[in-house]
Amino acid sequence: MLNVPGLAGIVVFYALILSIGVYAAWKRRGKGGESDEVMLAGRSIGPFVGVLTMTATWVGGGYINGAAEKVFDKGLIWCQAPFGYAISLAIGGMFFAKPMRKAGYVTMLDPLQNAFGRRMGGLLYFPALLGETFWSAAILSALGSTLAVILNIGNTVSILASAAIAVTYTLFGGLYSVAYTDVVQLFFIFFGLWLAVPFSMMNEAVGSLAPNETNWVGSIEPYSPEWGLWIDYWLLLICGGIPWQVYFQRVLSSRTPKHAQILSLTASIGCIISAIPACIIGAIAKATDWSQTDYGHTPEGYQVKLVLPLVMQHLTPPWVAFIGLGAVSAAVMSSADSSVLSASSMFARNIYKNVFRQEASEREVIWVMRAAIVVIAAIASTIGILIHSIYYLFKLCGDLVYVILFPQLLMVVHFREYVNTYGSFIAFCLGFLVRLLGGEPYIGVPATIHYPFYDEVLGQQNFPFRTVAMSVSLMSLIVASAIAKAIFTRGLLPARYDFCRCFDLGPKNKDESEELANGSLKVNGLVIPNKEDPSPLRAAEVKLYKPQQAGEQQPVGQV
């Protein structure tokens, strides 16, 4: 039977969020002619709003629902995703936020395209796209589960309605609308979850939370092969949590590089604090005698992902359950809008403009981005409807990002002189191949390589095979780049075979600028004599080709 009061409450909440998003877009009216304005809010996000929007982006439906699900199912020791992603924010702030913001990039793919060329950078978009799409699907799936339990609304209807609301204000206001709705949504999340904790603990069906009476902590035997899997997941979450456009979009929208660093470090603390009530709710579900509730039996199988909404529905008063439902809905939209906008921004700038239509106007890029928002949201909604485990989907989205993107971004940001396009392509292929050969039982990919401690019964790798694939990707990037450099710079192969134009400095083969001794600028053989005061046409050439200064982007590669 449809829960009418609950449905009315959700309609009011959605109307409030939509109104805030549209109002934020209205405030920025007349400033939306540039893609930077839509994608990065004109780089005007201050520290306070920046910290809140960064925290709200990570604390999504998959974050809180998945944390409760895992604590209930396997214990706190296996609830790695919320804490691993929080640590990744801190590491990203220490080592990546400042140089990325200082360089003035617009998307995470910009440094990769500058280093490896337009087409190789475009190829690297696909693991980023998959990551963002799976992320959105995980959090939409979490919302569908919650509404289905508390309001008796169909999973499909709730997912589509939530995605439609998030897409609407994102289309109009871009990052500015997303950031300001995130602020409101984060307060809903924090208040709603903490409100549910004491009420659920006081329910008579809940037993003791003492670890010796209710094993909500979980355990791993001292010499169990599961330690390899456990370590693998930690490394995946910490390192694989860095190369995300949804993260760098906040970093690059900060007013200064210092602000970008501060908001990353502060948001990591906010993410850990936000995960605590979800973990407590998972422990409460573990300690509950469900036969004493209206639900009648312990959640199992597909029902495990419903643990958080089940606790709210059956262990708290109705009004607390409705507020908690608002918290989950807020968590979903605060992450879904960010993730969809991030993937769409990369497509419009790094694929459509940089690869296919370099002459595209700013207005055209913005409209392509808006179309991509609708398409990506539709794909994420479809996956969210079809996939069952929230937590698994939550972790799966970081797999390819960890194996393929992390090594490439690490080397480009900190060791640019040691890598080139040949190494990038080989690393992409080898990393993907080794990861694929390790298997993925959840999507029906059998393991071709059986690493040590392989479980034949479960078809599960207990060796840190994802880290092996990432290491292969990193080492092949360095080694293949060094070999390619040696081959061409030492003349072992003629320059005409340098198809990626990495080492041939001739003007016919590579767009390259050279500053002469007298201060003139030489562009593809054309000498611009007065660099300080060139003609209007030459001014454009100087702007496009001059060597990188602090805070400026390098010219896009030619591959």
Image (cartoon, helix red, strand yellow):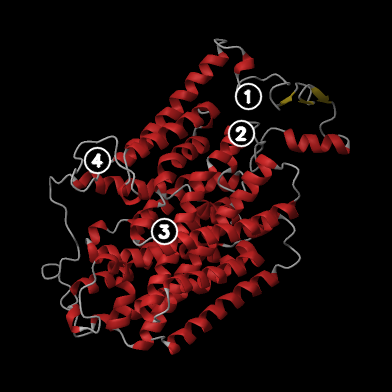
Q: Which of the marked residues, 1 or 2, is nearer the chain's N terminus?
A: 2
Q: Quadrant of the C terminus?
A: top right
Q: Is residue 115 above or below residue 205?
A: above
Where is residue 122? Give x, y as percent: 58, 40
Mark sitting on residue 463? 4
CA–CA distance in space, label 1 to label 3: 41 Å
Mark 3 lies on residue: 268
CA–CA distance in space, label 1 to label 2: 9 Å
Mark sitting on residue 501? 1
The local secondary structure at tag 4 comes to loop
- Tag 1: Cα neighbours inside 10 Å, few (<14), some, or many (≥20)? many
Mark 2 lies on residue: 117
Give the number of the mark in front: 2 or 3: 2
Where is residue 260? Give x, y as percent: 54, 54
| Amino acid bearing label 4 | Phe
| Amino acid bearing label 3 | Ser
Give the residue at the far right of this rendering.
535
> Is residue 43 at all visible to an observer of this figure?
no
| Amino acid bearing label 2 | Gly
Q: Is residue 450 left or right of residue 196?
A: left
Q: Which of the marked residues, 2 or 4, is nearer the chain's N terminus?
A: 2
Q: Which of the marked residues, 1 or 3, is nearer the chain's N terminus?
A: 3
Give the residue at the far left of this rendering.
212
Q: Which of the marked residues, 1 or 4, is nearer the chain's N terminus?
A: 4
CA–CA distance in space, label 2 to label 3: 33 Å
Task: Residue at 54% x, 64% y: name it.
Answer: 337
Where is residue 433? Give x, y as percent: 39, 34
Residue 214 in which image quadrant:
bottom left
> Is residue 94 at all visible to an observer of this figure?
yes
Residue 135 or 36: which is nearer the viewer?
Answer: 135
Q: Is residue 175 left or right of residue 427?
A: right
Q: Are marks 2 and 3 in contact (CB under 8 Å)?
A: no
